[in-house]
Image (spheres, rainbow, N blue to C red):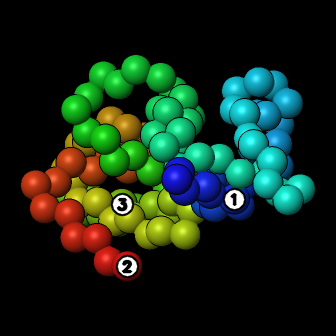
Amino acid sequence: MPEYLRIGEVATALGVSVDTLRRWEADGRVEFERQRNQRVLRSDKLPDLLHLHSGGPRTSSARNRMAGIVVSVKKDSVMAQVELVCGDFRIVSLMSREAADDLGLEPGSPATAVVKATTVIVEA
């Protein structure tokens, strides 16, 4: 028997609002089922929706992407520490100052954290 996610759970997983998902449904981008007057999505359909939300085909092998906003940039002569807020998550990246300058990263800038790791620890 398939597992179902409520619309609020889907919104949290995608980092969008419930209203956004309702608009997507009205536009035909997603189709929710109804259970007891609640919008639900089969959990096996979430990967397709994540793919759609991320903008389609990938140009990188990294699968872990979190859209966010830059909240701070600390630079010295060689390195930069860039902090993003991605939904409920704080992501900190260390990169060359040149890379941060080339990307134009500054507080308030939209950015996407892309994570490719050989080890990912998942906690429940």
Q: Quadrant of the C terminus?
A: bottom left
Which amino acid type corresponds to the residue marked 1 in the rendered image?
A: Arg
Does 8 sit above or below residue 48? below
Q: Dot 1: within a 10 Å radius of its alpha carbon, few (fewer than 14), some, or many (20 or more) residues? A: some
- With 21 as the anchor, is 107 left or right in this view? left
Circle 2 SS class: loop
| Circles 1, 3 touching at the beta carbon (< 8 Å) | no
Question: Of callouts 3 and 2, which one flags the residue occurring earlier in the amino acid sequence?
Answer: 3
Q: Residue 101, percent across and down?
A: 33, 42
| Label number found at residue 124 | 2
Q: Residue at x 44, y 50 (%)?
A: 66
Which amino acid type corresponds to the residue marked 2 in the rendered image?
A: Ala
| Label number found at residue 73 | none
| Circles 2, 1 touching at the beta carbon (< 8 Å) | no
Which one is nearer the viewer's eye here, 62 or 44?
44
Figure quadrant of residue 3: bottom right
Say which residue label 1 marks: 6
Q: Residue at x 31, y 41 (%)?
A: 63
Say which residue label 3 marks: 82
> From mark 1 to mark 3, how far is it between C-alphas?
34 Å
Which amino acid type corresponds to the residue marked 3 in the rendered image?
A: Val
Question: Of callouts 1 and 3, which one flags the residue occurring earlier in the amino acid sequence?
Answer: 1
- With 8 as the anchor, is 98 left or right in this view? left
Question: Of callouts 2 and 1, which one flags the residue occurring earlier in the amino acid sequence?
Answer: 1
Q: How many marks?
A: 3
> From mark 3 to mark 2, how far is it between C-alphas?
28 Å
Which one is nearer the viewer's eye here, 26 or 108?
26
Q: Residue 17, percent across and down?
A: 73, 54
Q: Dot 3: within a 10 Å radius of its alpha carbon, few (fewer than 14), some, or many (20 or more) residues? A: many
